[in-house]
Image (spheres, helix red, strand yellow):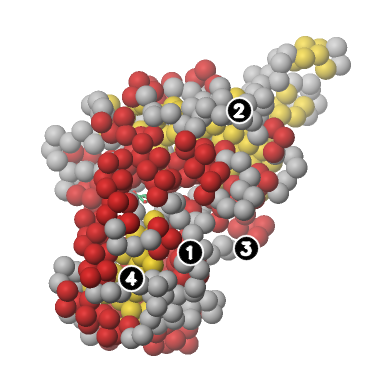
């Protein structure tokens, strides 16, 4: 079990977009919190000098953070070094090896196109750089289908141990996503009602109010199911529904996925926003979905009979990610001699986006009257608790510390691909929707029997 703390952080792909937007700013924030203690060796193709790397880091950090603390930035700059070359060329690895010096526990983070994952891993192995407690963090996506994920796992296991493999899903590094477990299990009021006796259905929404922008050539071969459902949203669902992880999160997480049958294509609505085919990098006759809504089931004692609805998409009315645990309606009852028939469900809403927090949508007596009115009891985590670390701060730190709890293991990744594989294999033509709407009408209707989707509260 790799548990020794890494003595080097090595980042492949430092000149890429993700490094600019996420990794470099996260390294800066870690430095500011005095949480970075190792040399950071960066690797890419361009023939850059150290000064060019530092200038790039400064620009990336300023873009995201605004004003920079010079003292913190100087410390980070001193930590950075740069090795360049072709990822397929063994010479690059010899140069990198020299730069790293004597190390037994380097943490290699691969934010490179997924087609290069195996190439880089194999080259590291050939150069004898994967021995001991060395580990590799693979950016998403890990595979493009069940079969490719299984093949990738097999190939990697030929050159390294499972405990050296960290499959990154940045949703697992989000504080409000981690909070799902704490909220559920650290409060007496939720756990007793968190099952099929009280819950009518679960709805997960991940809405983005922008299109694929300049990512057409990345997005078109991928689509919404592969981009965010197989990974982010299934992980969110697992944290919402799993049993308490007494020692280790891996087993209860896997149990949930094993209890979910393959999604039936009949229970899926795919959509594509108007204008998508004109995006640069998108095929003119593309049938890729930019929206999906689907229904799945969890065949367990706790959740049997409670449908799970997931919807995600680009160019929707708002940017929000949330889980709604919709409670069953109370039956018609008499209060003070008058029959009340509840029109509304009460919802527990777990907000996972930038407005992260929890709302309880409950019913109270209308003031001055006696009808029941819905109101929200709401907590905003940032206001109540202060700013949280960004996902990449947490994930890079966990990988360097050898804590694998935030990284899906081999079996988990394979199960999540297995669940969505039938809808990858059987894609029907997506229905067109207008940008700024909630997707095709069939997706809106999907939850009607359960009171309809809840509009995110943003
Ligand atoms: C990425 C997807 O994994 O997650 C993007 O590739 C998506 O398409 C992004 O926009 C959303 O992440 P977040 O953290 O902004 O919800």
Residue at far front of view: 158
Residue 78 visible in rendering? yes
Residue at far right of view: 336
Pointer 1: what residue?
1
Residue at 65 percent across and 60 percent down: it is 385
Q: Is mark 4 within 8 Å of ligand 1?
A: no
The answer for how far apart the CA atoms under marks 3 and 1 are is 34 Å
Q: Position of residue 268 (x, y in %)?
A: 36, 26
The answer to whether marks 1 and 4 mark residues whose Cβ atoms lie closer than 8 Å is no
Pointer 4: what residue?
130
The answer for how far apart the CA atoms under marks 3 and 2 are is 38 Å
Pointer 3: what residue?
386
Earlier residue among tags 3 and 2: 2
Q: Nearer the viewer, mark 3 or mark 4?
A: 4
Q: Which mark is residue 301?
A: 2
Q: Residues within 10 Å of mark 4 (few under 14, many from 20)?
A: many
Compare residues 300 and 160 and report the one nearer the observer. Answer: 160
Residue at 55 percent across and 56 percent down: it is 175
SS for tag 2?
loop
Residue at 53 percent across and 46 percent down: it is 251
Q: Residues within 10 Å of mark 3 (few under 14, many from 20)?
A: few
Earlier residue among tags 2 and 4: 4
The answer for how far apart the CA atoms under marks 2 and 4 are is 43 Å
Q: Which mark is residue 245?
A: none
Q: Nearer the viewer, mark 3 or mark 2?
A: 2
**Is 194 left, or right, of 396 in this rendering?**
right
Compare residues 336 and 87 and report the one nearer the observer. Answer: 87
The answer to whether marks 3 and 2 mark residues whose Cβ atoms lie closer than 8 Å is no
The answer to whether marks 2 and 4 mark residues whose Cβ atoms lie closer than 8 Å is no
């Amino acid at each position: 079990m790799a548990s020794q703390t890494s003595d080097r952080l090595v980042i492949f792909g430092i000149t890429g977009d993700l490094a600019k937007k996420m990794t470099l700013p996260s390294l800066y924030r870690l430095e500011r919190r005095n949480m970075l203690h190792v040399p950071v060796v960066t690797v890419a193709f361009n023939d850059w000098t150290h000064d060019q790397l530092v200038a790039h880091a400064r620009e990336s950090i300023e873009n995201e953070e605004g004003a920079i603390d010079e003292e913190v930035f100087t410390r980070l700059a001193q930590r950075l070094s740069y090795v360049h070359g072709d990822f397929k060329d063994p010479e690059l690895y010899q140069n990198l090896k020299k730069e790293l010096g004597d190390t037994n526990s380097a943490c290699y983070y691969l934010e490179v196109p997924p087609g290069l994952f195996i190439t880089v891993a194999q080259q590291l192995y050939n150069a004898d750089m994967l021995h001991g407690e060395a580990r590799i963090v693979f950016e998403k996506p890990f595979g493009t289908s069940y079969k490719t994920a299984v093949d990738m796992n097999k190939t990697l296991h030929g050159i390294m141990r499972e405990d050296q493999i960290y499959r990154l899903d940045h949703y697992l590094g989000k504080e409000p996503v981690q909070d799902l477990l704490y909220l559920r299990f650290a409060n007496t009021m939720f756990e007793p009602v968190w099952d099929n006796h009280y819950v009518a259905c679960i709805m997960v929404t991940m809405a983005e109010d922008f299109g694929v922008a300049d990512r057409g050539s990345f997005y078109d071969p991928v689509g919404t199911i592969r981009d965010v459902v197989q990974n982010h949203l299934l992980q969110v669902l697992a944290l919402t529904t799993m049993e308490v992880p007494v020692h280790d999160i891996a087993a209860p997480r896997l149990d949930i996925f094993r209890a979910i049958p393959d999604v039936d294509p009949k229970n899926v609505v795919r959509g594509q926003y108007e204008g998508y085919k004109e995006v640069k990098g998108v095929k003119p006759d593309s049938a890729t979905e930019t929206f999906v809504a689907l229904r799945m089931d969890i065949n367990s004692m706790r959740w049997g009979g409670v449908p799970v609805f997931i919807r995600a998409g680009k160019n929707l009315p708002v940017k929000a990610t949330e889980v709604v645990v919709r409670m069953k309606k109370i039956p018609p009852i008499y209060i003070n001699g008058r029959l009340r028939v509840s029109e509304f469900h009460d919802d527990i809403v777990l907000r996972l986006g930038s407005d992260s927090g929890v709302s309880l949508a409950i019913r109270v007596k209308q003031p001055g009257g006696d009808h029941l009115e819905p109101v929200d009891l709401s907590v905003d985590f940032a206001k109540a608790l202060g700013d949280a670390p960004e996902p990449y701060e947490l994930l890079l730190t966990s990988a360097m510390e050898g804590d694998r709890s935030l990284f899906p293991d081999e079996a988990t990744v394979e199960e999540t691909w297995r669940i969505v594989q039938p809808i990858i294999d059987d894609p029907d033509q997506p229905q067109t929707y207008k940008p700024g709407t909630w997707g095709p009408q069939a997706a809106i209707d999907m939850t009607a029997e359960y009171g309809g989707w809840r509009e995110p509260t943003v």
